[in-house]
Amino acid sequence: MRDVSISLDMTKTPNPRIHPAAKFFFEGDKKFFVKGVTYGPFKPDSEGNYLGRPEQVEIDLALMRQGGLNLVRIYHTPPRWFLDRCAAAGMRVLVTLPWEKHIEFLRQRATRKQIAEAVRAAVKTHVGHPAVFGYLVGNEISSTMARWLGARRVIEFVEELIGIGRGIDPDALFSYATYPPTEYLLPQNADFCCFNVYLHNQRDFEGYLLRLQNLTGEHPLILGEFGMDTIRHSEDEQAEMLGWHIDSVVKCGLAGTIFFTWTDEWFTGGEEITDWAFGIVTRERKPKKAFYTLEEKLGRSDSALPHRPLARAPFVSVIVCSYNGGRTLAACLESLGKLNYPEYEVILVDDGSTDDTAYVAAQFPQVRYIHQSNHGLSYARNTGAAAAKGELFAYTDSDCMADADWLYYLISTLVSGDYAGVGGPNVTPPAQNWIQACVAAAPGGPSHVLLTDTIAEHIPGCNMAFYRWAFEGVGGFDPEYHKAGDDVDFCWRIQQAGWVVGFSPTAIVWHYRRFTLRAFLKQQDGYGEAESLLRFKHLIFFGPTGTAKWRGQIYGTPRFSWFVNRPVIYHGIFGEGFFQSLYPSPQSDVAAYLSSIEWFALTIFLFGLGIFLPALRIVPYLMLGGTLCVALSYMVRASIEPKFDTVRARLLVMLLAFAQPLVRGFSRYFTWLRFKRTPANVIRRHEHLPEGARSAGSLSRRVFWSEQGRDRHYLLGAMFQLLDEEDWRYSTDSGWNDWDIQIYGNFWWSITLQTVTEYHGGGKCLTRVRLRNRPVTTTVIFSLIALTLLIYRQLNVSHVELWSIGAYLLFLLFLATRARALKSRVAELVDAAALRAGLQRVARKAKIARATAEPEVQVPVNVTDPASPHLPG
């Protein structure tokens, strides 16, 4: 039975005030684009009011609405009459709460308490007022003061102030206004991120906005101040700059911008400022040229996103693949029917579902429905591409809901550069219970990996789009991947072909994480299997434990952690750099090893060994403590939805952080061991070779001769054919190995095959083949265990115990015989491949042994594009 509680619109709320959802603001179920301007401060009156006379405020608000503005940012707590007049004019108010940020405010408890009380009083004064958009609990703490006090302490204090304000007025939005010298001051509990940025070069400005978009993660990003002085620049320059500023803000997907400032009238520091003129109107409220530019660009009083026309809008085929996804399918298809994009089609590929997927699909006649028997995710994606009419293929999943501007932002990025494809973030919808919130906060979810702010190494399959020519150029998705990993393989093949994958931070899909703990662990099991399969094909991208080694960075709002993955801040000389960049540290190798299944297995082994060696008993406890410290660190810095953020939720996240790499690692090893073993019946078979083609020489080396120009490529081509025909498991050189083929044999050994050809002129070629045994992981593990037990036994007896030594030698003899048997079988395979390729064996005394049978096929292999590794379906 499908859960009808799942809603299409993740933005709906019963509260009429503005609320955030991922990278955007919403008023009800419609996007609210912030078109703001700073207002004041003006010379205070007798009551300490910095906002001028009520009559002038009314005139200003009416003129603002005429110019298309919908928000004012002020720098002092307003009187009630100001908010009432803003509400009447349809203007929202963003209140900046002032306090003494220029002093060492964290040193004394009394100072901290005074600041907190000031925030509490200011918010309490206007709690629930409909004109209040939100509060900024601070503004531009100086970089040297933040460095002096410590970035982590400052962030935690700002987060404390946000918590105080939210506790009083939970429906208001809260944030902190930072700027480039302190871009690292990003409170994690903020509702949105606010940056004051003054950059007068459009290219540099857009590049910095894209950096901020990735740095701020899933929060809406607005600019808190931006402007130009018309004393030092002309009004024409100001108008031109504010014009392209709006274009850039929209292009980069920000949730809005605030111009500095409304009028040239400005009072600060206890005096009237007369040598700056940033206003878009004069002191006399006469509009400057910039006012009319804003009036044209912002669309009058409309709060919707001012879309820029796309440079090109190609026809897009949106492909949704589903297997038993009926629970969320209706919401997915409904969202895809409301996209703000001119021409597209929606194709649903049902991969043999047994639930109500077909019934749900029938409710959407505009969707092209394709049903197939269950072949796996990759096969379904290829089926959708084969049926597609579009120039581009955009993929999402049945448990996703697309933002209305999803295609707009994807295609906008794709056509803006030399990209083969593009992707965007997948954002978790609001959780329905505390367990789902914990699963969403746990490690191991699908995420993008970025090489730069605009170029991706990997984009998840639930949010990607590629040109048809790129899709066909790499041969589509590899059907070997049934559950996951197809998107990783596809992105790596795109990049290996020399093409680039772009990234759009605001092309958002809402992606449900798993609803239960069991489903989460099953997902991690599938990811482990996918990693193992990927390792066959892309060995260079994997470490010794089988985990992927990303070249790029997983972006997001960095959290200052006390144990692992602490971000690095560039402060500049003496802490006075203008752009003090925050660099999230790459994943800690130490943390990865401490939480890995290999580390856990070694811990268990030492626990057992400690039974016999009391001196070692403390070691496994220390090792387990290290593992728990990693999980504890993740628990501390995990981002859990506030309403579900409880002690038990944090403890569950710690448990999931502990279990996730173990489940994933076990599946990875199980799959690797299962798939890297060629079936025993294949190894037991022998090749039917003519007498003259059999070689009695060394098993490690083979030499073959040809006078028809048949070099090692012909031999390798024939090897691939035989390996596939006989169902061997193998991998081919990815370009980073010193072998051509690695053949996975029995439980203990694999064989690496390397070839070289000597060219002797006139089509005469001498091809040499070298075979080497390579132990697999199980061989190493069992050998170490056996050796450890032998040493322990000999240390604990008074004489040499021959039976234990004999048992160990028998084990070594067993390994040697298994290695020779496998090498002998592979040597037969090489001889058969040489016969098929038309090569003649060279005997030990340099005589050519002529084969009595003609070769069956003559197939060269292209060394620049080696055959894919063979993995069983």
Image: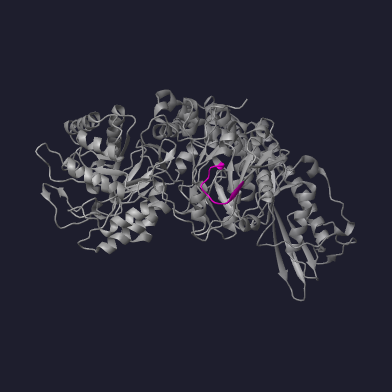
Q: Residue at x 71, y 66 (%)?
A: 757
Query: Which quarter of the rendered picture does the C terminus lie within?
Result: top right
On the image, the x and y values in percent for residue 489 come to: 60, 49
Is residue 340 on the magenta stretch? yes
Q: Residue at x 12, y 42 (%)?
A: 44
Residue sticking out furthest to the left: 46
Q: Is residue 60 above or below residue 429?
A: below
Is residue 225 on the magenta stretch? no
Quarter of the figure with residue 397: top right
Q: Is residue 317 left or right of residue 88?
A: right
Q: Is residue 583 left or right of residue 853?
A: left
Overall secondary structure of the magenta stretch? loop
Q: Is residue 866 left or right of residue 56?
A: right
Q: Is residue 235 above or below residue 616?
A: below
Query: Which quarter of the rendered picture does the N terminus lie within?
Result: top right
Q: Residue at x 20, y 41 (%)?
A: 101
On the image, the x and y values in percent for residue 702 come to: 76, 59
> Front-most of 687 and 243?
243
On the image, the x and y values in percent for residue 333 come to: 58, 39
On the image, the x and y values in percent for residue 652 come to: 47, 26
Instruction: Inspect this view and state whether residue 686 appears.
Output: yes
The range drawn in magenta is 336-345
Quarter of the figure with residue 692: bottom right
> Front-most of 253 and 774?
253
